[in-house]
Image (cartoon, rainbow, N blue to C red):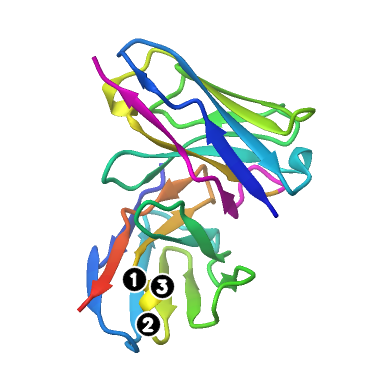
Amino acid sequence: EVQLVESGGVVVQPGGSLRLSCAASGFTFDDYTMHWVRQAPGKGLEWVSLISWDGGSTYYADSVKGRFTISRDNSKNSLYLQMNSLRTEDTALYYCAKGGWLPWDYMDVWGKGTTVTVSS
Amino acid sequence: DIQMTQSPSTLSASVGDRVTITCRASQSISSWLAWYQQKPGKAPKLLIYKASSLESGVPSRFSGSGSGTEFTLTISSLQPDDFATYYCQQYNSYFTFGPGTKVDIK
């Protein structure tokens, strides 16, 4: 069974840092692009970042560029999101999602998400 | 940046109804469009990709059409399990989701 399990979400103060993790199983992790997508409470979906199969290419939404860093460890079937200089508007449920073989493709498997709350 | 709009924002329907949701892109995205279903407290689920391709395991009452800037998601006969919020997403250039259409019980 293809599965993505996110972890690392906590309550953090504005300006703080946090690292999210996503453990993948049930598919050949290093064949696929991976994404982070977030959803603020009661709001819609917002794409955050993607990383290519080999980690060689990364892309970010303008709202997080320069503050967030996506990475992956294919030996551990794991995806990460380092979040720095956090703002209240970063409060959201963060989903890890599996993409395609190429960066610009749909997301066919999603985790259940991990909640990040930025509040003083 | 490519902007996505959806209409209606809310749709009230009954079991058995034919339901159509429209998604528009601010510029041509060819057929690089996906549709997702999200239920409260759950992750999004892929329904349709490349505008009209049905994801494996998704019931055939779901269908997608369109290309360029205008797309539709149709549910041919609404079932109780289909009451949810539906999002379109373009993946032609980066990724943008529509604001969502909530389908609720009439």
Q: Which residue is mark 1?
A: B83
In the rendered image, residue B88, in percent from the top left (x then y), is placed at 42, 59
Chain identity of mark 2: B
Looking at the rendering, the stretch of residues picked out in magenta corresponds to: A101-120
Chain identity of mark 3: B
Q: Crowding at label 3, few (<14), some or many (≥20) Cα neighbours within 10 Å? A: many
Q: Residue at x 40, y 74 (%)?
A: B81
* Residue B82 quadrant: bottom left
Of mark 1 and mark 3, the one earlier in the sequence is: 3
Q: Residue at x 61, y 72 (%)?
A: B57
In the rendered image, residue A17, in percent from the top left (x then y), is placed at 43, 13
Q: Which residue is mark 3?
A: B72
Q: Secondary structure at mark 3?
A: strand
Looking at numbered disc 3 in the image, what kind of residue is underneath it?
A: Thr
**Image quadrant for the N terminus of chain B?**
top left
Q: Is most of the magenta stretch helix, strand or loop?
A: loop
Of mark 2 and mark 1, the one earlier in the sequence is: 2
Q: Are discs 1 and 3 both within one chain?
A: yes
**Image quadrant for the C terminus of chain B?**
bottom left
Q: CA distance from mark 2 to mark 3?
A: 15 Å
Looking at numbered disc 1 in the image, what kind of residue is underneath it?
A: Phe
Q: Crowding at label 2, few (<14), some or many (≥20) Cα neighbours within 10 Å? A: some
Q: Residue at x 34, y 71 (%)?
A: B83
Looking at numbered disc 2 in the image, what kind of residue is underneath it?
A: Leu
In the rendered image, residue A103, in percent from the top left (x then y), is placed at 64, 42
Q: Which residue is mark 2?
A: B78
